[in-house]
């Protein structure tokens, strides 16, 4: 069944039936509707999405059960929670989506599938619209005509949206091929860019296009970038940066690199390695280009390239490269090469081939270091370090050349180490040989080394089982066993398994023992098999940490101490080299490899640059200390609370446990100090003393213990000695660290101050002064030391030292400043004032020195200025008047002129007699070029500095004006008055006149000339500078502000508003308009005359069109008027004028704002506009808007005006209390007057919310408040005796109306919590109130209690007896009888008779439907009469042709015929004749189908069909009987009509009409296809014949030919004949 017909059936029959009879099936129904609506996209594509929307909103627009008009149906009020359930919300969402989808399809021609639309946002839908524009040249037109209305409707930001689209386009197309990318993406992106107007956004879009464009750029992209590079905008620098990256991409394409992340530092380093690895002639230059492009240090390139040359034994080329590099970079490169060579020598494998390649390393490094040594002359400290490295490499090179031995730099320092190294290598070789033999033996036995190892493990396992050890004991034993054999990897694997599978105290003890034993083995240098790359100290530390987590409490302190010690060992290890035993060197981070976060966070903090330690000499000692702190003892049995660790171990009588750690600590400290690892030494010293002190304290906590024996005294003395030694070491290390700190490029002064505080005053100050004395002319170092010294002296309150250091700070700062200018300061540094005076002349002669610097110099050293030559000053000044400085002249000429003039100003201060100079310069000033500010400024400065009083103008004012004019760029050409001035003074027009304002016309001429110049220059961008000029010249600022307002209004605001008006977006407030309005308001606020400001603001508001901008302007105008009123005293004449103006403006504002508000909310109809001046009445009228009724009846519809929002804003604008108005409306809607006089019409009590317009308005008003507040208010109305709004007496009618609203707006839970009653009690109370309201109107006194306790049948009969003459009473009797099932035949006979008598036909029809199921009432006399009356009622007033209302009534009458239970008693033929008279033959035939007698029915139908037009009959069936309730009869009537046509062979009436498919289907169903096809063929209707045959073949399931010809049709007819 088509969805259109199905919707009629569902809306009129199924949905009302389910909601009333089977409400629990409502959710299933909603789900079905949702799924059905979605499926229509596939099943009925032609009508999509309108058909889907019709199906989805069917639930909301279908007939409601309460439309029956009875109390029983009127009380069918759905609960709030059922209305707002999840399924309903989902269906509403679907309806909203389909409504938007319909708009997209029909209005914006954007076809999206529903599933796609639900995933989109309004922004992405705009993207999809743009995607569908295939030709870039169509984008502007499409954007303006189709997409712009969509953007405005959804209040989207167009510029941001277009920028986001370009970015989205980039993300979509960045992975495509180059050709597709260039032709589609770039053209579309630039077309979208052309539609943008915001400058910032345009630059962002250009940047995006640049980032995404394929390199090399196309001509269009190249032109776009160059065009924007020429503009003056802050983001031009970003464009330049991107352009530079494009050049880099071109370079990379030469190396075959296309896709490369150029914003990752690691990638850059990989790129450099790749370029250098190509070993091309241009590789080095290209790598340097990349480095310079990314502003990286070139050291990495030099380092990589030199290592390549060294490996290839190209010593000469390597030296040539270093000679071409700056010395500072040579130093860094060579030091890195030394580290690299050291690693290469120490980490070499034993492969002879590799040794051959290693031979050139030491030899070439020797030449490189000699080269650096020859050029290292100034830095004595570094020169000594280079000499040390040179000797080592000489030794290594000699061993390699003469003895073919490869040794490390550390081993070559003494012969004993070489012998020890030899012995170790022999042992390693022997052990390797043994292992290889074991593998060979295992191979001969048919196994492997693994199998042999497993055999050994199995033996140990079985041996352990004999002693009844557990699996964990076995594995633990295996761990210790494998460690004894030196297999570290196997030991760690076993420990890992233990830790994963057995996390208990025993495992913790095993891990602790293994870590201890490894420390012991490393201390003793026991041979171990360590996997390549394994970090042994880190592994030991990790084992100790794991042991801490699972060990027993008795072992916890030992494990914790072991963690601390192994952590310290790991710190030392990080400063060590790598050898064959798996130790790793400390890798110094290269400058280019630094992490940006680390650089930013830690860049200015001190990092000690010590010599890399030799692990062979350091690590054993470190682990000896570790073993001393946590002794390894496998046979000592510990009691609870006993500890092995030294800090907590008990002291043994007669022994000093601390003596064992003295020697290793001393040795390690000496070693660390020798290797300049002072921070580690300081850490070791403090930790060691802390452990000793802790040991002493732990053994002397008890006063009894502290008095025992000589041993504790000896320990105490030892700790004191260690403390003294630690103090001296700390003092020594602190001094050394200070030396290192101050030798850093950037000094960490905070840390330096901390180290200083570790030293005594005498030592630290002596140390600081020694550093200063040794620093010579290193002003940076001197400045850092002086700053630290000054801070230290301040902390120690040494005033004399503080003064000295502060003076030194001044000298150092000036040394730095002057050295940057190329001025030598050595001769005067820390010297007397006489030598400092001589430096002044040098300062004056230097072209880079200005007067400010000279004055600072004089003030810093207390010097006085002296005389200089007047001729020299005049020469300098006249040098600048020989020509004009234009914008196109070289920059150095302009700088030279400026420098000379500045020197003249400074030198002039030395003159004693300046009168002649001032007279000369004043005469020349008026003849100067008014656009040459440089010369004018220099002249004025010289005159000002002369302090002469012979001049008659303000010099400060003139100089300040020049400063403003410098920063100003002219926007208007020179005027006639300027040309006249130049001619008068015989001055040529300067090229600078196009960009500069004339100084003389602004300063020396009258005010009128000033305004002539300024008025032509007014603009939003230039106003700030013009304001400063006006303030300086002391002209009327109010005049300037008013001129600025007029200019901005005419030149900026009006054109923008006109453009918006043309686009149809009058209500929009764009960013540009907001900024312009803000500028205008700032000008108005600055006007000091309040009357002028008010008048000017009012003029602005009058010029603006109606809209939000005008309202904003009027509101601001009110503010100006209020300021005017406040500025006047009540007694002033202007006060009354200001007050009158304010009142007038307030009225104008309120009226305009109200009108604009109505327009914004689409409420600007004449009936509302007439009430603009009556806001309270207007608000009340707004709440009677027709949309309130529509939104409750059709909740899924859109574009309803926001009445609440409009009313609230209206009240705010007009200063009204909106709550009072709403309460008045609620009283009007909920408590209408009830007339006890039956002659007057009272409100209908039995109406439900959707039938009572007042109740619908009340519900809408209540929706603005919180639900609990509204519920309490309605319950107050329903339960109180007087109105909570105004004290009026409450009636049951009022209570019933309030309760109906309550049930409509609040859910059951809220109602129960507020009323303390269940929802069923509230509904029952509502029913009682409805009936009692009717009793009130009938003037029959009843209360709730009397009504509940009375006999309902007696009440009904008594009411019938006394009031059966009143229509309202009869209706009440009917309702009560239906409610309480009183079906007395005599009573009902009278009721039906009265309803007929009172002509209550509509109500009677509903009553008859309600009592149809009561069989006892069928026999009463008036039952059939009543049915007959209601069925024939529409025919009494109907005329032919019937109106739409009459047609609807006739349709309802036919429904009653169908529903009538006493159809045999009706005159169906007579009813059919009534329909015939109205030319409704379809309904007439439907009545004939209901005739009980089959023979009579057949006879009547045949006669009827002969008398009517079958086509008309078919048309009426389709037009008027397609609803679900009469669908069955419509089908029968359609068949009869089609059968009549077929019998009469009247096919021509339907051929080509919309009813032909019905005929075709009828003939197929009745197997009469041959007749129809034969007729069509004979009439040459071949297309219709083919259609019939095709459908028939489909119906029969037979194959269909693609091309059906006339011959085939004839064959088909022949087959049908057979």
Image: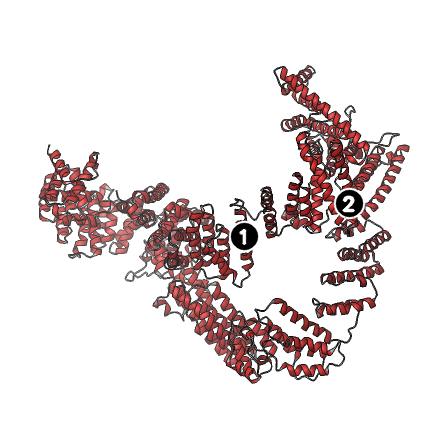
Q: Earlier in the sequence, mark 1 or mark 2?
A: 1
Residue under the point 55% across and 61% down: 234
Q: Residue at x 78, y 62 (%)?
A: 825
In the rendered image, residue 407, in percent from the top left (x then y), is placed at 74, 33
Quarter of image, res 1189: bottom left
Q: Residues within 10 Å of mark 1 (few under 14, many from 20)?
A: some
Q: Identify the image's colour scheme: rainbow, by chain, secondary structure or one colour.
A: secondary structure
Instruction: Give the quarter of the image for residue 1438.
Output: bottom left
Q: Residue furthest right?
A: 710
Residue 671 is situated, as x and y percent measured from the top left of the image, at: 80, 38
Is any part of residue 819 visible from this angle?
yes
Q: Is residue 656 left or right of residue 1411?
A: right
Residue under label 2: 385
Q: Say which of 876 and 163 sits in front.
A: 876
Q: Quadrant of the C terminus?
A: top left
Residue 887 picture quarter: bottom right
Give me the disc on residue 247.
1
- Per the image, label 2 sits on a secondary structure element best described as helix
């Amino acid at each position: 069944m088509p969805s259109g017909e199905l919707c009629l059936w569902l809306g009129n029959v199924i949905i009302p039936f389910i909601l009333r009879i089977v409400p629990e099936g409502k959710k299933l129904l909603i789900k079905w509707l949702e799924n059905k609506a979605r499926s229509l996209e596939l099943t009925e594509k032609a009508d999509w999405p309108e058909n889907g929307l019709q199906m989805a909103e069917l639930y909301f627009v279908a007939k409601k059960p309460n439309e029956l008009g009875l109390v029983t149906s009127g009380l069918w009020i759905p609960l709030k929670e059922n209305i707002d359930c999840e399924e309903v919300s989902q269906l509403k969402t679907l309806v909203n989506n389909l409504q938007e989808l319909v708009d997209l399809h029909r209005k914006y021609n954007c076809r999206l599938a529903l599933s796609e639309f639900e995933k989109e946002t309004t922004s992405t839908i705009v993207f999809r619209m743009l995607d569908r524009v295939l030709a870039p040249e169509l984008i502007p037109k499409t954007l303006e005509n189709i997409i712009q209305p969509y953007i405005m409707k959804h209040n989207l930001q167009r510029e941001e949206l277009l920028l986001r689209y370009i970015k989205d386009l980039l993300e979509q197309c960045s992975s495509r091929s180059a050709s597709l990318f260039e032709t589609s993406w770039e053209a579309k992106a630039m077309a979208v860019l052309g539609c943008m107007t915001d400058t910032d956004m345009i630059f962002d879009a250009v940047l995006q296009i640049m980032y995404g464009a394929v390199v090399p750029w196309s001509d269009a992209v190249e032109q776009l970038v160059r065009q924007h590079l020429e503009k003056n905008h802050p983001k031009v620098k970003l464009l330049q940066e991107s352009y530079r990256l494009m050049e880099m991409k071109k370079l990379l394409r030469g190396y075959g690199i296309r896709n490369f992340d150029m914003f990752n530092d690691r990638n850059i380093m990989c790129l450099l390695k790749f370029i250098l690895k190509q070993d091309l002639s241009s590789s080095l230059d290209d790598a340097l280009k990349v480095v310079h492009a990314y502003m990286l240090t070139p050291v990495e390139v030099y380092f990589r390239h030199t290592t390549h040359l060294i490996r290839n034994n190209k010593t000469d080329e390597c030296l040539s490269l270093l000679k071409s590099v700056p010395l500072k970079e040579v130093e860094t490169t060579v030091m890195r090469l030394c580290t690299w060579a050291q690693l290469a020598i120490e980490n070499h494998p034993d492969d002879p081939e590799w040794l051959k390649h290693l031979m050139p390393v030491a030899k070439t490094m020797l030449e490189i270091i000699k080269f650096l040594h020859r050029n290292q002359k100034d830095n004595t400290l570094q020169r000594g370090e280079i000499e040390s490295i040179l000797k080592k490499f000489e030794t290594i090179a000699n061993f390699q050349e003469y003895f073919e031995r490869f040794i490390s730099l550390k081993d070559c320092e003494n012969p004993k180490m070489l012998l020890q190294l030899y012995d170790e290598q022999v042992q390693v070789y022997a052990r390797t040989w043994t292992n290889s033999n074991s593998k060979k033996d295992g191979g001969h036995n048919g196994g492997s080394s693994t199998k042999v190892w497993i055999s050994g493990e199995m033996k140990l396992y079985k041996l352990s089982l004999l002693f009844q050890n557990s699996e964990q004991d076995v594995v633990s034993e295996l761990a210790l066993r494998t460690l004894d054999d030196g297999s570290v990897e196997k030991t760690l694997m076993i420990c890992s398994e233990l830790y994963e599978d057995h996390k208990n105290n025993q495992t913790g003890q095993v891990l602790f023992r293994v870590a201890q034993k490894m420390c012991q083995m490393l201390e003793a240098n026991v041979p171990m098999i360590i996997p390549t790359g394994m970090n042994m100290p880190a592994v030991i530390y990790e084992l100790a940490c794991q042991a801490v987590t699972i060990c027993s409490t008795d072992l916890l302190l030992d494990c914790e101490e072991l963690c601390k010690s192994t952590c310290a060992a790991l710190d030392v290890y990080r400063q060590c080299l790598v050898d064959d035993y798996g130790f790793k060197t400390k890798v110094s981070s290269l400058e280019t490899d630094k992490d940006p976060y680390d650089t930013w966070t830690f860049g200015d903090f001190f990092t000690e640059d010590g010599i890399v330690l030799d692990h062979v000499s350091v690590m054993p000692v470190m682990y000896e200390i570790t073993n001393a702190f946590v002794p390894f003892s496998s046979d000592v049995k510990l009691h609870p609370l006993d500890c092995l660790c030294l800090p907590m171990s008990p002291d043994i009588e007669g022994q000093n446990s601390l003596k064992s750690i003295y020697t290793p600590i001393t040795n390690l400290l000496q070693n660390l100090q020798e290797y300049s690892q002072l921070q580690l030494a300081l850490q070791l010293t403090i930790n060691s003393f802390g452990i000793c002190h802790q040991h002493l304290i732990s053994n002397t906590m008890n006063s009894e213990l502290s008095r025992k024996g000589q041993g504790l005294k000896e320990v105490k003395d030892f700790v004191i000695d260690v403390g003294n030694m630690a103090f001296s070491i700390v003092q020594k290390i602190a001094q050394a660290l200070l030396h290192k700190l101050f030798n850093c490029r950037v000094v960490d002064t905070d840390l330096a101050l901390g180290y200083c505080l570790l030293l005594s005053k005498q030592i630290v100050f002596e140390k600081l002064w020694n550093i200063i004395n040794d620093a010579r002319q290193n002003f940076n170092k001197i400045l850092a030391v002086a700053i630290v010294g000054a801070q230290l002296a301040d902390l120690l309150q040494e005033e004399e030292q503080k003064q000295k250091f502060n003076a030194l700070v001044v000298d150092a700062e000036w040394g730095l400043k002057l050295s940057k200018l190329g001025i030598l300061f050595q001769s005067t540094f820390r010297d007397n004032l006489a030598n400092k005076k001589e430096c002044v002349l040098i300062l004056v002669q230097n072209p880079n020195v200005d007067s400010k610097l000279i004055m600072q110099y004089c003030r810093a050293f207390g010097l006085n200025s002296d005389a200089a030559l007047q001729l020299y000053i005049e020469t300098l000044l006249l040098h600048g008047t020989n020509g004009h400085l234009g914008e196109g002249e070289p920059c150095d000429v302009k700088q030279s002129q400026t420098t000379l003039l500045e020197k003249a100003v400074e030198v002039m201060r030395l003159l004693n007699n300046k009168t002649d100079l001032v007279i000369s310069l004043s005469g020349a000033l008026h003849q100067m070029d008014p656009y040459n500010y440089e010369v004018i400024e220099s002249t004025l400065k010289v005159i000002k500095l002369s302090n002469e009083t012979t001049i008659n103008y303000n010099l400060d004012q003139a100089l300040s004006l020049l400063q403003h004019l410098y920063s100003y760029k002219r926007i208007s050409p020179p005027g006639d008055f300027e040309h006249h001035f130049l001619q008068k003074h015989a001055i040529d027009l300067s090229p600078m006149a196009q960009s500069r304002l004339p100084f003389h016309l602004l300063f020396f001429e009258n005010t009128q000339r000033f305004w002539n110049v300024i008025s032509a220059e007014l603009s939003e961008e230039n106003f700030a500078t013009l304001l400063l000029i006006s303030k300086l010249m002391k002209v009327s600022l109010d005049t300037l502000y008013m001129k600025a307002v007029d200019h901005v209004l005419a030149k900026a605001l009006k054109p923008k508003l006109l453009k918006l008006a043309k686009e149809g977006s009058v209500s929009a407030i764009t960013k540009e308009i907001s900024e312009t309005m803000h500028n205008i308001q700032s000008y108005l606020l600055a006007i000091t005359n309040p009357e002028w400001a008010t008048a000017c603001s009012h003029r602005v508001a009058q010029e603006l069109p109606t809209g939000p901008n005008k309202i904003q302007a009027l509101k601001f105008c009110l503010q100006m008027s209020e300021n005017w009123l406040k500025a006047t005293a009540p007694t002033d004449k202007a006060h009354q004028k200001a007050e009158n103006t304010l009142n007038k403006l307030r009225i104008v504002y309120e009226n305009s704002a109200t009108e604009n508000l109505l327009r914004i909310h689409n409420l600007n109809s004449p009936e509302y506009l007439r009430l603009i001046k009556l806001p309270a009445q207007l608000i009340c009228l707004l709440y009677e808007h027709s949309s309130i009724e529509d939104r409750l009846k059709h909740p899924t519809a859109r574009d309803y005006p926001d009445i609440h929002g409009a009313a609230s804003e209206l009240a705010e604008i007009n200063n009204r209390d909106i709550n009072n108005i709403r309460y008045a409306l609620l009283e009007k809607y909920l408590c209408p007057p009830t007339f006890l006089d039956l002659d007057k019409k009272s409100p209908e009590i039995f109406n439900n919310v959707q039938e009572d317009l007042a109740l619908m308005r009340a519900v809408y008003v209540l929706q603005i408040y919180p639900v609990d507040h509204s519920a309490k208010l309605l319950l107050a109305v329903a339960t109180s005796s007087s109105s909570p709004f105004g004290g009026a007496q409450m009636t049951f009618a009022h209570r019933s109306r309030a309760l109906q609203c309550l049930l409509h707006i609040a859910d059951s839970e809220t109602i129960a919590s507020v009323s303390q009653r269940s929802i069923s009690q509230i509904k029952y109370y509502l029913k009682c109130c409805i009936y009692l309201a009717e009793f009130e109107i009938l003037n029959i006194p009843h209360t709730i209690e009397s009504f509940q306790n009375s006999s309902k049948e007696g009440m009904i009969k008594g009411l019938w007896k006394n009031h059966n003459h009143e229509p309202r009473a009869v209706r009440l009797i009917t309702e009560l009888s239906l409610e309480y099932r009183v079906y007395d035949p005599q009573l009902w006979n009278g009721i039906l008779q009265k309803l007929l008598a009172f002509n209550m036909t509509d109500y009677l029809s509903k009553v008859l439907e309600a009592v149809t199921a009561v069989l006892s009432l069928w026999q009463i006399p008036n039952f059939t009469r009543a049915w007959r009356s209601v069925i024939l009622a529409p025919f009494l007033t109907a005329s032919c042709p019937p109106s739409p209302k009459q047609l609807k009534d006739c349709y309802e009458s036919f429904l009653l015929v169908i529903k009538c239970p006493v159809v045999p008693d009706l005159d169906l033929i007579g009813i059919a004749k009534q329909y015939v008279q109205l030319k409704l033959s379809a309904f007439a035939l439907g009545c004939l189908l209901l005739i009980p007698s089959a023979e009579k029915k057949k006879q009547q139908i045949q006669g009827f069909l002969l008398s009517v037009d079958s086509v008309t009959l078919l048309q009426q069936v389709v037009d008027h009987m397609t609803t679900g309730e009469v669908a069955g009869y419509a089908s029968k009537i359609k068949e009869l009509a089609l059968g009549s046509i077929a019998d009469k062979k009247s096919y021509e009436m339907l051929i080509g009409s919309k009813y032909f498919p019905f005929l075709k289907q009828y003939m197929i169903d009745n197997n009469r296809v041959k007749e129809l096809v034969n007729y069509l063929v004979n009439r040459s209707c071949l297309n219709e014949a083919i259609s019939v045959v095709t459908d028939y073949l489909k119906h029969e399931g037979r194959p269909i030919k693609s091309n059906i010809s006339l011959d085939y049709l004839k064959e088909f007819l022949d087959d049908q004949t057979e």
